[in-house]
Image: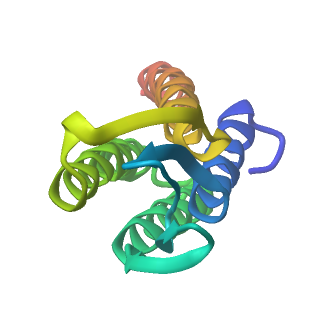
Amino acid sequence: MLQRIQTLFLLLAAAAMLVASVTPLAVFMYNSDKVLFEAMGIYLNGTLNDSTWGLFVIGIISSVVALITVFLYKQRILQIRLSIFNIVIMLGFYLYFGFILYKIYPVENLQFQKVGIGITMPVIAVILTILAIRKIGVDEALVRSLQRLRR
């Protein structure tokens, strides 16, 4: 289990989504006020303005799904399906981020100051998950070819 490269990819994807859940996503100016966007909330001049706990929950669910997928190493097809489901969850993180940003703050008044490391982590997690899916597929093809030889 731990000696397979896809395990490392899935563990790194889980860590990336955990980092996305706890680090700042973006810093921007809105009507000359500094706004810090995190997965747990939007802070206007240092005080909590809006709660965005849904982003935090999506990030944690994605991390948990990646960790569960690691331990299903004997069921490779299920691993692939859960990994695809996890990619959908990670893309949902971005969609929900955009929805919250558009819903709460009008886009014409936003001036981005800095993109946080948390907003890049789901992309890295998606790439790592795709790499894991490819390696799981290689393992599945190897097992099937060996079963053919035994017959």
Residue 7 is situated, as x and y percent measured from the top left of the image, at 69, 44
Left or right? Give the position of 6 relative to 105.
right
The image shows a total of numbered marks equal to 0
> Vertically, is 145 above or below 5?
above
Residue 15 is situated, as x and y percent measured from the top left of the image, at 70, 53
| Closer to us: 97 or 86 | 97
Residue located farthest toward the right when viewing the structure as drawn: 3
Left or right? Give the position of 24 relative to 129.
right
The reply to whether residue 122 is in sight is yes
> Vertically, is 139 above or below 34?
above
- Of the 4 image quadrants, the one containing the C terminus is top left
Residue 108 is situated, as x and y percent measured from the top left of the image, at 20, 35
Q: Quadrant of residue 71?
A: bottom right
Name which residue lies at 41% across and 45% down: 83
Residue 72 is situated, as x and y percent measured from the top left of the image, at 54, 60
Name which residue lies at 41% across and 22% down: 148
> Vertically, is 97 above or below 130?
below
| Closer to us: 128 or 124 | 124
> Vertically, is 29 above or below 23?
above
Name which residue lies at 46% across and 48% down: 32
| Closer to us: 149 or 24 | 24
The reply to whether residue 129 is in sight is no
Colouring rule applied to residues: rainbow
Residue located farthest toward the front when viewing the structure as drawn: 32
Name which residue lies at 75% across and 37% down: 4
